[in-house]
Amino acid sequence: MTSTHAQQLLSILARTSFKLGQFKLSSGGTSDYYIDCRTTTLHAEGGRLTGEAILDLLHQNNIDTAAVGGLTMGADPIVSNVATASAWRAQTQPGSPLIHGFLVRKAEKAHGTGRRIEGFHRQGARVVIVDDVCTTGASTINAIEAARESGMNVIAVVCIVEREDANGRAAVETAADGAPFLRLFTATDVRTEHVKQLAQVQI
């Protein structure tokens, strides 16, 4: 049986992005594990699978969007991967939509146009906010607010990994104001796969 894009992505995440130990989180708390999704989303195959898996997730949930975007820099490779994957699908699957990308700066530029949104921008456009790891949800909420302030309509939020122990989901769902919060994996999913891979190596 051919594994799905998500299953293949989980394998790479567990191998390259998950670490056990003692780590300080951006929220100020500590944890016995750390997930750095960028080592996967910037990996050649991991990046491709990120784009494909998120497209699959959007399709499964009937999310029809013009673009995906998120706060720099965790969202940067995700946005590019999804946009590129949508272009490949449009070539091979007639009628498959092109999904463009935009990035949200942490602050407005002090020069030039002074924009916070880079890339796709259209008033009233239906867009999806993406992020790598949802812990407190702060970066995701920042992107939601910026997209709405720019006149776009946030219809869903997607993260690669949700840390269930940090209550980020509740904060994001409140900010999303009815737009669904979707995830590819929980941190438990990634930990379980990581431990399984370690056990296989030791056999």
Image: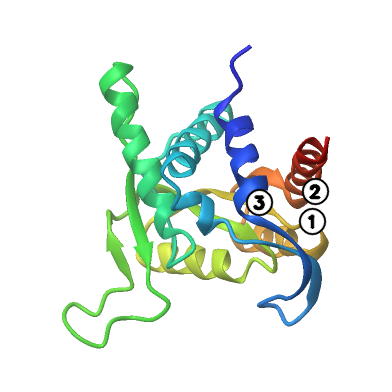
63 vs 140, nearest the viewer: 140
Tell me if label 1 and label 3 are in contact, CB under 8 Å. Answer: no
The residue under label 3 is 161
- Helix or strand or loop: what does disc 3 sit on? strand
Residue at image x 59%, y 24%?
4
Q: Please, what is the three-letter code of the amino acid marked with disc 3? A: Val
Q: The disc labelled 2 sits on which kind of residue?
A: Thr
Q: Is 125 situated above or below 3?
A: below
Q: Position of residue 171 (x, y in %)?
A: 70, 65
Q: Give the CA separation, mark 3 to mark 2.
A: 9 Å
Report the label total.
3
Q: Which residue is mark 2?
A: 188
Q: Secondary structure at mark 1?
A: helix
**Label 3 neighbour load within 10 Å: few <14, some 14-19, many 20+:** many
Which residue sits furthest top?
Answer: 1
Q: CA distance from mark 1 to mark 3?
A: 9 Å
Q: Residues within 10 Å of mark 1 (few under 14, many from 20)?
A: some
Residue located beneath label 1 in the image:
164
**Horizontal and vertical percent for residue 41?**
48, 50
The image quadrant where one finds the C terminus is top right
**Residue furthest out toward the left:** 112
Amino acid type shown at disc 1: Glu
Decide if residue 185 is in sight here. yes
User: Which secondary structure, mark 2?
Assistant: helix
